[in-house]
Amino acid sequence: MTAYRRNFVQGGCFFFTVNLAERKLSLLTEHVELLRAAFRETHRRHPFTIEAIVVLPDHLHTVWTLPEGDADFATRWQLIKSAFSRRLPSNERISQSRSAKGERGVWQRRYWEHTIRDENDFVRHVDYVHINPVKHGLVDRVRDWAASSFHRHVELGNYPADSAGDLSDDDRD
């Protein structure tokens, strides 16, 4: 396996994709309040700014900015994942390797992380976060997906309410 190195930038801005272990489940949207509680609990102990977020049935995308002098997004993800998992009934399938380590089988162990390089990169990733429910065919318009920071961005004047309405079939890949 390639030795992947995460880019820990103090006070950095990052895009993340975090997936459930069982991609066919809908735990995140079925238990979105538990996920929100896990985020709040982690944020109280280890502050960060959620610039954008969308929660889909089996994964989420988010853009965070960490406080100056802090690059520890890994601890935050560990805390969010464990807090959410603790609140769920223990009825998921657990592999032998996870069982041997005393782990739950809710989340994929790893996650995708990208360091935001500049303002254009930031805008592209925030747009990607918000268009994702449309891309996955869950809704026809971005505004129709409730578990999204899109609505906050509309209130802030960053987007018109009818922003990113439709995608062609070619864009849903």
Image: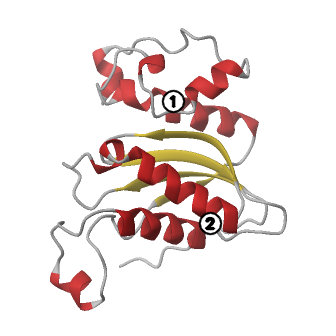
Mark 1 closeness class: few <14, some 14–19, many ≥20 residues within 10 Å: many
Which residue is pictured at 30% across the width and 87% down the height?
102
Q: Quadrant of residue 75?
A: bottom right
Q: Quadrant of the N terminus?
A: bottom left
Q: Could you tell me how many numbered marks the image carries?
A: 2
Q: Quadrant of residue 108?
A: bottom left
Q: Nearer the viewer, residue 157 or 167?
A: 157
Mark number, residue 24: none
Can residue 113 be seen by looking at this rendering?
A: no
Can residue 167 be seen by looking at this rendering?
A: yes
Q: Nearer the viewer, residue 1 or 24?
A: 24
Q: Position of residue 143 (x, y in %)?
A: 48, 18
Whole-angstrom CA distance, mark 1 to mark 2, is 21 Å
Which residue is pictured at 42% across the width and 25% down the height?
145
Whether residue 123 sits left or right of residue 70 in the image: it is left
Q: Secondary structure at mark 2?
A: helix
Q: Quadrant of the C terminus?
A: top left
Which residue is pictured at 31% across the width and 20% down the height?
170
- Which residue is the extreme one toward the right? 68
Residue position marked by numbered label 2 in the rendering: 73
Amino acid beneath label 1: His
Q: Quadrant of residue 21?
A: bottom left
Q: Position of residue 74 (x, y in %)?
A: 57, 71
State which tag comes first along the sequence, 1 or 2: 2
Whether residue 44 sits left or right of residue 140 in the image: it is right
Q: Position of residue 38 (x, y in %)?
A: 51, 59
Amino acid beneath label 2: Phe
Which residue is pictured at 64% across the width and 19% down the height?
154
- Which residue is the extreme one toward the bottom? 100
Q: Position of residue 131 (x, y in %)?
A: 46, 27
Residue position marked by numbered label 1 in the rendering: 130
